[in-house]
Amino acid sequence: MTSAELLSLFELPFLDLLYRAQGVHRENFPSNRIQLSTLCSIKTGGCPEDCGYCPQSVHYDTGLKAEKLMPLDAVLEAAAAAKAQGAQRFCMGAAWRSPKDRDIEQLGEMVRGVKALGLETCMTLGMLESHQAKALAEAGLDYYNHNLDTAPEFYGEIIRTRQYEDRLETLSAVRESGMKVCCGGIVGMGETRTQRAGLLAQLSALSPQPESVPINQLVPVPGTPLADQPPIDPLEFVRTIAVARIALPRSTIRLSAGREAMDDALQALCFAAGASSIFYGDQLLTTSNPRAEADRSLMERMGLQAA
Ligand code: SAM
Ligand code: DTB
Ligand code: SF4
């Protein structure tokens, strides 16, 4: 769908938009199901990129200590704990511009080890070249996460160390490798509604569309350029989820970062608008997430089952 078509969806009365989004959701997904992914930061901080939202960039002083790549046994321990809590997928994130070829073998071992525990695997490691994507796919990596983050027109105000085009190239390398694509963005960075529609238009134009689409609400972190960004109107956030649901009818829409700033009623509205996946576990990458216990309670009160 075009940006203009998506903008006109944003402009519908709230309840009409929700009604349409729910219809699309019910046509394409089983009802009352939620997908649970647990994040693990396998390489924290010290990233050379300058993404204005990110606590892990070396360009900003956020008090975060840079660490080396986590050893295999520690990754497997975290994955086993995630599995025991009920996670279905284990997502490993690294604060890199891109992985080095010499890291790929170790990353492959992580993939094999996590899969052997009975979990799906996802990694987000920055930009990938085709041969790296192929090697990760051969190791059995199920999903690769690489976000477009925002509309092309707004991108340059948030990130200067790499271009939109670079992101699109990585996405096509991932697609060609046979891995499933996880690609979404962040809202609440000061973008306009037109730009939110622009991001969703870019995502919907990916062919085939990404299997998984994380919609993050900015977590403002002290020390980053976006630390004082005022929060987005909660109903506008729900609208973004609903428009994503309609624009990407078969993609799993993940209610991603930012849930700590949302109460249960707002999250329930996001699920009503078509989100059916969350990050599950007390920690995102470097910031906190609602406690697993609180999410289990929310799921139970809503009659949502993990699947
Ligand atoms: N370095 C890799 C990259 O950027 O592709 C992988 C890790 S990076 C932290 C993964 C994603 O986390 C970013 O694309 C962004 O969408 C999200 N993210 C980072 N900081 C965030 C924040 N403060 N609030 C919301 N989302 C954030
Ligand atoms: C995504 O879209 N959101 C996740 C995951 N993909 C890697 C990361 C959110 C990070 C939030 C900030 C932090 O905890 O560092
Ligand atoms: Fe680095 Fe990823 Fe953070 Fe950007 S979002 S600074 S690439 S870790």
Image (cartoon, rainbow, N blue to C red):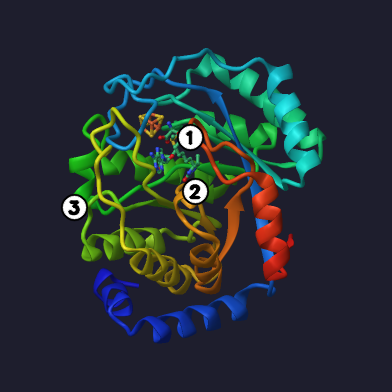
Left or right: where 157 falls relative to 200: left
Spatial separation of the CA atoms under disc 1 and disc 3: 28 Å
Q: Dot 3 corresponds to which residue?
A: 153
Question: Which residue: 45% across, 25% down?
Answer: 95
Q: Quadrant of the C terminus?
A: bottom right
In front: 263, or 276?
263
Work out whether mark 2 precedes mark 1 in sequence or the reverse, and give the earlier one. 2
Q: Label 2 is placed on what type of residue?
A: Glu
**Beta carbon at label 2 within 8 Å of ligand 2:** no
Work out whether mark 1 precedes mark 3 in sequence or the reverse, and give the earlier one. 3
In the image, residue 173 sits, relative to residue 188, either above or below, namely above
In front: 110, or 304?
304
Work out whether mark 3 precedes mark 2 in sequence or the reverse, and give the earlier one. 3
Question: Which residue: 53% across, 80% down?
Answer: 22
Left or right: where 245 falls relative to 48: right
Q: Within the displayed image, which quadrant is ligand 1 positioned in?
A: top left
Q: Dot 2 corresponds to which residue?
A: 260
Q: Label 3 is placed on what type of residue?
A: Glu
Spatial separation of the CA atoms under disc 2 and disc 1: 10 Å
Q: Secondary structure at mark 3?
A: helix
Q: Dot 1 corresponds to which residue?
A: 287
Question: Which residue: 52% across, 29% down?
Answer: 132
What is the x, y in percent for residue 92?
A: 59, 33
**Beta carbon at label 1 within 8 Å of ligand 2:** yes
Mark 2 or 1: the one toward you: 2
In front: 200, or 193?
193
